[in-house]
Image (cartoon, coloured by chain):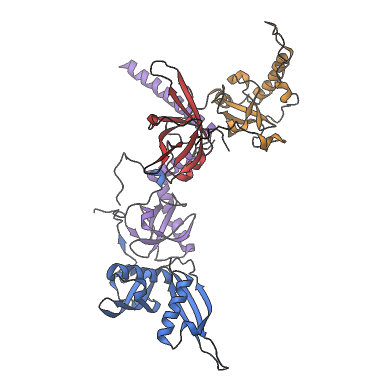
Amino acid sequence: MPARLYVKGTFLGFRRSLYSQRCSTSLIGVEGVKTKSDARFYLGKRVAVVYKKSSKSDQCGMIWGKIVATHGNSGVVRAKFESNLNPRWMGRTVRVMMYPYKA
Amino acid sequence: MVFQRFVQIGRLSLINFGKQQGKVVVILDIVDKNRVIVEGPGVPRRVLSVKRITLTPHVVSIPRGVRSGLLLKKLEEQKTVELFQQSSWGKKLAHMERRKELTDFERFKVAHLKRQRAMLINKAMGKLRAKK
Amino acid sequence: MLHQFVICGRKVPTGTEATQIYKMRIFAYNEVQAKSRFWYFLKKLRKVKRTAAEILDVKEIKDKKRTSARNYGLWIRFQSRSGVLNMYREYRDVTMTGAVAQMYGEMAGQHSARFDTIQIVDVKEIAAKECKREKVTAYHDSKLAFPLLRGSKVVRNNKYRGTFSAKRPNLF
Amino acid sequence: MKIQRFTVPRPTHKASSTGECKAHVRPGQVVIILSGGFAGKRVVALKNLPRGFLLVSGPYKINGVPLRRVPASRVIPTSTLVDISKIDLSQVSDALFKKEKKGRKVIGKRSASFENFCKVQSTVDTQILSALKDQPLLKKYLDTKFSLVDGDKPHEMKF
């Protein structure tokens, strides 16, 4: 089993108000992170979303992003990606890397 | 008796919220139904809400509102804190605390020892199965 | 958070005669409210009005970090909807300001009394023997023991919250 | 309104390019590589190189990681230390890693720089291995890859 060096996060949705959403910022729920103070560890960490290019081929693509801020008090974080995430991926797992690592 | 543990003077309890979480304290005085005055090793005397403590089955017999010096003496005499730390609850807390402090190499050693133990157990089981 | 202030004021001296200095102990949420309550009371007690008087000093009495339970007696004058009532109330607390804050809370709960309808006549720390109210004397028994009814939710760190739990909650 | 494309900045080393980056890794400290081909490998950090790089070596015999430069931000420093005080790292510097000019590659004949590299590699590794001689568990530790397991919380873990 290959070594897993990323923390599993879920793409919860976009940053939004009730009637509008800002697709440039996605909300990520990191596994095991439930308070804002814990979420601060993940600030600046790189995030990768792996997706299959098309249902027929097994080729997969990757969108890189970075965690830019905490969001709220329950450990959710905000991330910005090279290109905005596909809304159909809401609820899917994203990979929160452990780098850049600050001791 | 439905209840065994009471908020009472001398009751050993555990702080379960805040910076001093996990620390053992003794209830010295009862302000009202929501607040008690506690003190313990590593916790200077303070007022605390009962919602933030969990009661243990241990009680140290002390007079009301005792001063810190006498409290320490009584605790040493009756060894209530040690009693709690030897109990399975106390041991489990200490175990979890220790596990949290493990460094990467120590986690590796724990996994290594667990594998060795499992091998010994399987070997022994194998022999038993063979005998049947 | 309620604070305790000691405020001194006097009439602005017009001639050379010596002016009387008045000092009062006021419980209020901030300094501005304390000064306004000072003038409110002084106008009722003496022929002194804010317009022709001045405040000499406002000092907040900081409660020392006390760690022993005390009993406080409060004599108050309460303007209810139907008339004026004099009340004597007792509270157990660690500091005097805490007892007064408990009083305001309880009056609001039981008599829907607003802050400005209550005038504190006197606040005193009283000995356990002199306590009259059963709510307070109940805690004087050193053998007192009561179970923790976990109706009051146990406060846990947000880190340990979860949607599911493998074992039943500890209710005592 | 043109949506400003978010560009993920390359890891800039401006802060550390001026001089010796703040020595945050002690020589002989075991570190975990987080990205790149050797991700997950536990290696021995030998030296802090300028521009925020670390010089690491597996050692090669144990886990196949050669003398290599790794960015300090792509590494988790652990608290395990290998005593390499007696090691001399004089020949090791950025120059060692300079690529040959793109001359015609002669098949089967190793270039001079690669030859030199292997020599330096073996001298450094033998010194590390001698330090690890009496610690079989540490050798096995360097041999196994680090991996997160379900339920691990890196923000609470100590390394």
Do we see residue B95 in this rendering? no
Chain that appears blue: C
Image quarter of residue D25: top right
The x, y position of residue D58, in whole percent, is: 61, 23
* Colour chain A is painted in: red
Residue sitting nearer the eye, B33 or A71: A71
Residue C149 left/right relative to C53: left
Image quarter of residue D37: top right
- Name the image quarter holding the N terminus of chain B: bottom left
Q: Residue at x 55, y 89 (%)?
A: C13
Question: Vertically, is A4 above or below B38?
Answer: above
The x, y position of residue C22, in whole percent, is: 49, 85
Residue sitting nearer the eye, D65 or B83: D65
* Colour chain D is painted in: orange
Residue C108 left/right relative to B66: left
Do we see residue B23 in this rendering? yes
Residue sitting nearer the eye, A1 or A26: A26
Image quarter of residue D27: top right
Question: Vertically, is C144 above or below D92?
Answer: below
Residue sitting nearer the eye, B129 or A19: A19
Residue D157 left/right relative to C134: right
Chain that appears purple: B
